[in-house]
Image (spheres, grey):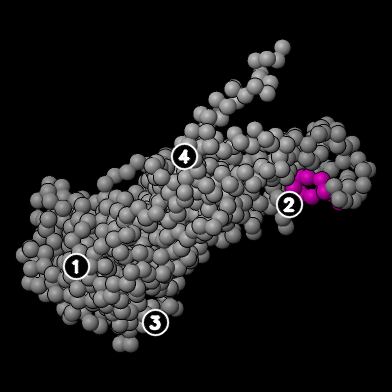
Amino acid sequence: MPTLICDCNQTMPLQPQTLGAALNETLTLHSALCRREAGAFQKAIQSGDDVVVACTQEKRLFAEVAQQTQGASSPIRFVNIRETGGWSKDASQAMPKIAALLAAAHLPEPEPVSTVTYTSAGRLLIIGELDAAERAADLLGDALDVTLFTQGAGNAGGDQERRYPVLAGKIQGLTGWLGAFELKWLRNNPIDLDLCTRCNACVAACPEGAIGLDYQIDSALCQSHRACVKVCAVAGAIDFSREPEKLSEKFDLVLDLRPTAAFTQQALPQGYFRWDGRDIKTITQVRSLVGEFEKPKFFLYKQKLCAHSRNDKTGCSACIDVCSASAISSERDRQQIKVNPNLCIGCGACTTVCPSGALSYAYPRASEQGVKIKTLLTTYSRAGGKNAALLLHSQEAGARLLGDLGRAARLDPATQGVPARVLPVALWHTSSIGLELWLSAVAYGASQVWVLMTGEEAPQYREAVRTQMDVAQAILKGLGYQGEHFRILQARDARDLASLDADLQCAPAQCVGKSAGFAVQADKRATLELVLDHLVAQAPARPEVIALPAAGSPFGSLAINKETCTLCLSCVSACPASALQDNPQLPQLRFIEKNCVQCGLCVKTCPEKSLTLVPQLLLTAQRKEPVVINEMKPYACVRCSKPFGTLKAIESMLGKLAGHAMFQGAAAERLKMCSDCRVIDLYSADNEIKITDIR
């Protein structure tokens, strides 16, 4: 795969020999690749191999040259090495970082995933005051099929010429997404807008001024003079005897002019827009949404791993709580959650907080992100780099900020720019990578993992990332790794560049002595086990157990009150991860700490409230083995001596039923028998009436 590097006007201290050695490729340094040296670019794209161009500034020009080049068949990838490193104050030490960025650009594209399809025929609903709604409709009516839902007359009221259908009444619900919105409303006004001709006779005739230029009657002002009915006799649009009517209609798009959105979630559905009457970008977006559209299905869900619900009890609901799009809901009757792919925005926060790995990010997959992170860090290290810090950022707002910082470093002597040891990694969303990949990066040799947030994220996403970072940091601190390995960096716009620049200059934390060789797995828990094994093997300290924060911990143990536990084993059937197990041979409760996801289903299921979650990480071999956490003497049947329960459970049952009228005398003795002997005793008793004797 050819790599083309260009340094216009020699603004970067690039070392093509050093970079070529790291990439196992002979590199030529160009100075005008997009212009007088364009022949080298054209020759490369005629080879048929993927071509990496180390320039994003002239991406559009390169694309035009490629279109005009005969025989050009090579896919082209672009990578920014200028603002992200070549223009920093320590750019002379940035060759390992630049080599790593170029190596990552050579990686294949993520495997394709299934898609979610939206179909829009351009049926647009505009909700707002009638005058503003008609102005918006004028900007959109030539491209879309517009319907207005009036929320009052506004300052000017409706135009005399009725150019668009107008609905009115009380909105009772708006649901859906692009191509599938449903509006439900109650039509409860005496004036039927379909029959109204906007002649204004009723407005002039009403003595109370109860009729506005939205052609609806304000019932609070109306004094029942009915002068409006008389003047509207020909059109017949006004009828005070008309019963309120519940109606619904489907739309593809919604433009909402009201100050309060129809949806309460932060991430609004695709196809729903709010407009303040000024931003023309919104109007342009609405106009463009006619046709068929696709997006990746960003998630994979494995119900058998899900720790959400068992036996009508709710355990883990982390994904539901964190979702800003209201795309995830509970299906307790089916012991699972449900993700609406049409509402999902692909943030991946649900996969980050999921302790079991039941939800995983699909585009790109964790394994593909793992390959990218490993490639970056191994190439960086092979080229002589030390103390690498991964900077995870969004591919739009985050990338723009890093570009601004790089340009500021070029022009401002006081700005350092992106340091040579900081490797930027662009993500669709900054919350899509979590604990297993952060710790994998450390195992691969990263000193730190930082997440740059720009204010575009929902508040709960920031809190979720911080919570997971607290768990990851507690693990490394417990293992004796010094320094702060995980941090959220915050910058919203150019005003925050100085603070971002200062944050990026912080000292490195302690790295592993030897980088790991494992690959990130598709299964989250499997990856975590590989990571922990490596981090423990390289750890400066090896305690038996590490206490973890209660919030967000995917690891932990169980504390059991043996005095109250009756060994009913209801917790075993509730555990979705097989962390709790029984013993078919003996009345025992066993626990495998490695399997526990701290979902709390066992705690909520236990009728005696004998269990308590203990967030921790056990580092001894005992963590992966079944350990007996409670056992009891078996209770022997008083008739055949076969064990059929525990002593404590039978004694507890006898105590609770001692005063019950149906369990006295021989009936009480049967409670002490196994199921077989109980039936035999019932049929062999001479002093009891049998059901077969009743006529």
**Which quarter of the figure has residue 387?**
bottom left
Q: Which mark is residue 153?
A: 2
Q: Secondary structure at mark 1?
A: loop
- Establish if 635 lies above or below 132: above
Q: Which residue is mark 1?
A: 515
Q: Amino acid at mark 2?
A: Ala
Q: In the image, is residue 203 part of the stretch drawn in magenta?
A: no
User: Which residue is at the front of the view, 345 or 585?
Assistant: 585
How far separated are the C-alphas under marks 3 and 4? 74 Å
Q: Is 278 positioned to the left or the right of 405 in the image?
A: right
Q: Which residue is mark 4?
A: 643
User: Which residue is at the front of the view, 329 or 632?
Assistant: 632
Q: Which residue is mark 3?
A: 498
Badge 3 or badge 4: first in the primary sequence? 3
- Mark whose residue sits in front, 3 or 2: 3
Badge 3 or badge 2: first in the primary sequence? 2
**Part of the protein shown in magenta:** 209-218
Residue at 47 percent of width and 45 percent of height: 634
Name the quadrant of the N terminus. bottom left
- Mark whose residue sits in front, 1 or 2: 1
Q: Which mark is residue 159?
A: none
Badge 1 or badge 3: first in the primary sequence? 3
Q: Amino acid at mark 3?
A: Ala
- Establish if 385 lies above or below 356: below
Residue at 35 percent of width and 41 percent of height: 114
- Number of labelled discs? 4
